[in-house]
Amino acid sequence: MAGSDKIKVLFVCIHNSARSQMTETFLNKLGTGKFIAESAGFEPGVLNQDVIKVMQEVGIDISGNKTKSVFDLFKEGKPYDFVITVCDESNAERCPVFPGKTQRLHWGFTDPSSYKTEPDDVKLPKIRAIRDQIKSRIEQFIKETDVK
């Protein structure tokens, strides 16, 4: 592993405003101290307010999170055990190759911002479904890595 007993994971999407923020938060919360998760984007934007809302519904406040650039983290030379892209595949290919023995994975999730023009009673259930898919995938990842 990358220099500690914890597994270091970087989640990457386009704006670091929704999917990567949720994956980072769920892994840090559910990984019981066995993981260090971060997230970043290709074009860091502003946190998605609807995602903040649906995360608060499950008792998680991400409203204070900041968006970060994947290229800034790359320049810092930070080692990661896993770099996981959570955007569509064509954007995932833009991710830089991090140094060391980094395993790259791709988990495609629908972008919550694709629903931004829909009314709340339509978009929020869709974003909740994405949140729940992400949480399930994180739980599966934790089991698969089986850190002692």
Image (spheres, grey):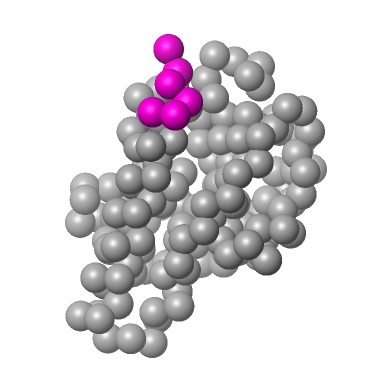
Instruction: State which quadrant residue 30 falls in.
Output: top left
Residue at 38 percent of width and 51 percent of height: 134
Residue at 36 percent of width and 68 percent of height: 49
The percent coordinates of residue 17 (x first, y second) are 49, 62
Q: In this view, does 122 lie to the left or right of 37?
A: left
Instruction: Please say whether residue 66 is visible from this viewpoint.
Output: no
Instruction: State which quadrant residue 7 falls in.
Output: top right
Residue 15 in magenta stretch: no
Q: What is the magenta range?
A: 143-148
Instruction: Please say whether residue 96 is visible from this viewpoint.
Output: yes
The percent coordinates of residue 110 (x first, y second) are 45, 67
Q: In this view, does 96 lie to the left or right of 64?
A: right
The percent coordinates of residue 101 (x first, y second) are 73, 27
The N terminus - image quarter: top right
Residue 32 versus residue 38 in the image, above or below: above
Along the line of sight, the residue nearer the viewer: 108 or 64: 108
Along the line of sight, the residue nearer the viewer: 24 or 130: 130
Residue at 52 percent of width and 20 percent of height: 6
The C terminus - image quarter: top left
Residue 50 versus residue 41 in the image, above or below: below
Residue 144 in magenta stretch: yes
Give the mark count.
0
Instruction: State which quadrant residue 44 falls in.
Output: bottom right
The percent coordinates of residue 122 (x first, y second) are 25, 81
Along the line of sight, the residue nearer the viewer: 60 or 106: 106
